[in-house]
Image: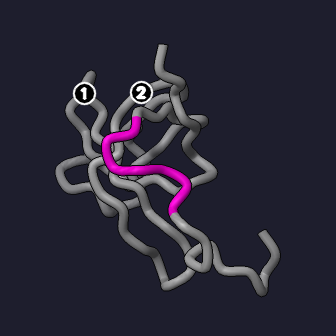
Amino acid sequence: MQLDELELDLPPAFEIGQKVRVRKLIRNDGTFPGQDIGAPLAKKGDVGYIVSIGTYLQTSYIYAVHFLENGNMVGCRKKELEPVEAS
C-alpha cells in the first residue's frame, strides 16, 4: 500500500462471519482489558471468525476476530490475517 493510498478507499478484505487464521503472534498493546500489556492474545495459526469491522485512524480497517478456542475477541489488521478456505 502506498502512502497516498488509503485502505478505506477499498472494500474490506474480509466479511463478517468469515473464518480467518492469524499470520503472527498477537500481543496485548494495552487495549485488551484484563490482560497485561504484552500478553499473548492469539498465536500464529489460531483460527477465528470475523464478528465486526471497524476503522482505525480513518486509514485502515480493524477486524474484530472471535477466537473460539480461547474465547478472546481481538482487533486485527488485514496484514495479520489470512482467509481459511472452506473444506
SS category of the residue bearing label 1 = loop
**Image: 69 above or below 2:** above
| Label located before the other in sequence (2 or 1) | 2
Would residue 1 appear left or right of 15 to someone viewing this image?
A: right
Judging depth in this view, the residue of 16 and 73 nearest the camera is 16
CA neighbours of label 2 inside 10 A, class few (<14), some (14 to 19), many (20+): many
Camera-nearest residue between 19 and 41 = 19
Report crowding for label 1: few under 14, some 14 to 19, many 20 or more residues within 10 A (C-alpha).
Answer: few
Q: Give me the residue at 20% from left, 56% from top.
A: 33
Q: Answer left or right for 36 relative to 20.
A: left
* Residue at mark 2: 47
User: Could you give the CA–CA distance between mark 2 and mark 1, rounded to whole angstroms?
Assistant: 8 Å
Question: x, y (%) of residue 72?
Answer: 25, 39
Instruction: Where is residue 30? Give x, y as percent.
Output: 35, 61
The residue carrying mark 1 is 68
Residue bounds of the magenta highlight: 12-18
Specify the amino acid type for callout 2: Val
